[in-house]
Image: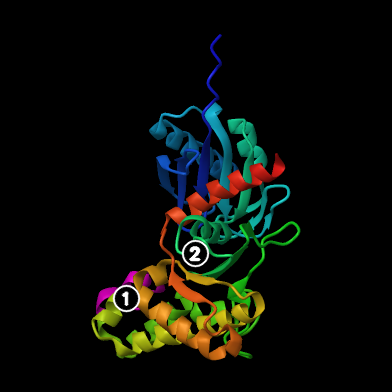
Amino acid sequence: MMVEKEKAKYWVGFDLGGTKMLAKIYDQDFKAVGSERTKTRGHEGAKAGLERIERTIRKALESAKIDSSQLAGIGVGCPGPLDLKRGVILDAPNLGWENVPVRKTLTTAFGCPAHIANDVDVGVYGEHRFGAAKGARTSIGIFPGTGIGGGCVYEGKIIRGRTSSCMEIGHIQVMPEGPRCGCGRRGCLEAVASRLAISARSAMAAYRGKAPHLLKQSGTDLANIRSGALAASIKAGDEVVEIIVREAARHIGRAAASLVNLMAPDVLVLGGGLVEAMPELFVSEVKLTAERRVLSSFVDSFKVVAAKLGDDAGVLGAAAWAHQQEQEEE
């Protein structure tokens, strides 16, 4: 009598953060076998957004030639405050979503378990499992972008609150009575070291004639002064832009020192578009600043590294986190 071969199991990783939706299908060894990418459409409405998530996953399944019945689980990295227990996005301002039942919708649509997590958390988890922090006991990620996201993985688990994500590194105060942050407080790391903060200061410098290359190539519109433009400006000799970026990196280093004193991580992973565009600058400034401010016993206890996985960190981390959650529930 022939024994029926065990049904193959595949995992979906989905990244809802940033400006795109990215779905990838992974086999049991977390090798990608299919993918689909589409742009995020702000304020299209939660119903339409959930439908697009479903369509994107189905197209990724088609590219992998995998049927949904073969799925073992889905992991989704989501922006905004989340109710992790219920699998609900509570508020995603950039998408215009409130109280969106992602877990229930995807579980119903694909007939398999679905798990959500903060998009930066799964990015850090991806780097911890497969990337720049592989093998570490404790990994902390700092990802400067439009804001500044953070996450921590300790002994294979994402550090989180009872029902929500935590590690709001962008809202560590680094400048008492400093610039007002989008959260309403003053002096948050995000207010002085995010890509938006850097771009705003660089635009002022360009307007005043202090950054001629940046002015010529990108003007003073913040929408055009992105990470690549800042890196090109520095390479072309706009010294004031380099000063602005290095100062921002030192602010991140000050916050990183507090995190080292608190959590004693093996590895600090720096990621996001800014770091991808200027990895050596950010790694060197953050490392030097952090080493000068941590307790002397911690000086040689941690590494500062640039993330390795790029866009794959979030989707790979989300898929692996869903797998981890299912293993814990067995």
Neighbour tally class for label 1: few under 14, some 14-19, many 20 plus, Cα within 10 Å: many
Q: How far apart are marks 1 and 2 (CA)?
A: 25 Å
Q: Position of residue 195 (x, y in %)?
A: 45, 74
Which amino acid type is marked by label 2? Answer: Ala
> Where's the C terminus, which quadrant?
top right
Q: Marks 1 and 2: which is nearer the front?
A: 2
Q: Where is residue 87 in the image (x, y as percent from the top left)?
A: 68, 47
In this image, 267 relative to 84: left or right? left
The range drawn in magenta is: 215-229
Q: Position of residue 18 (x, y in %)?
A: 48, 58
Where is mark 2, residue-wise? 133
Q: Tell me if I can see residue 139 in this picture.
A: yes
Q: Quadrant of residue 137?
A: bottom right
SS at circle 1: helix
Residue at 35% from the left image edge and 74% from the top image edge = 278
In this image, 11 relative to 173: left or right? left
Residue at 63% from the left image edge and 36% from the top image edge = 107
Q: Quadrant of residue 131?
A: bottom left
Eyeballing the image, is 217 above or below 12? below
Which amino acid type is marked by label 1? Answer: Ala
Q: Position of residue 193 (x, y in %)?
A: 49, 80
Neighbour tally class for label 2: few under 14, some 14-19, many 20 plus, Cα within 10 Å: many
SS at circle 2: loop
Eyeballing the image, is 46 above or below 238? above
Please name whichever residue, 211 or 30, is drawn nearer the observer in this view of the structure: 30
Please name whichever residue, 186 or 322, is drawn nearer the observer in this view of the structure: 322
Where is mark 1, residue-wise? 231
Q: Which colour scheme is used?
A: rainbow
Residue at 55% from the left image edge and 79% from the top image edge = 301
Most distant residue in the right direction: 162
Would you say the magenta stretch is mainly helix, strand or loop?
Answer: helix
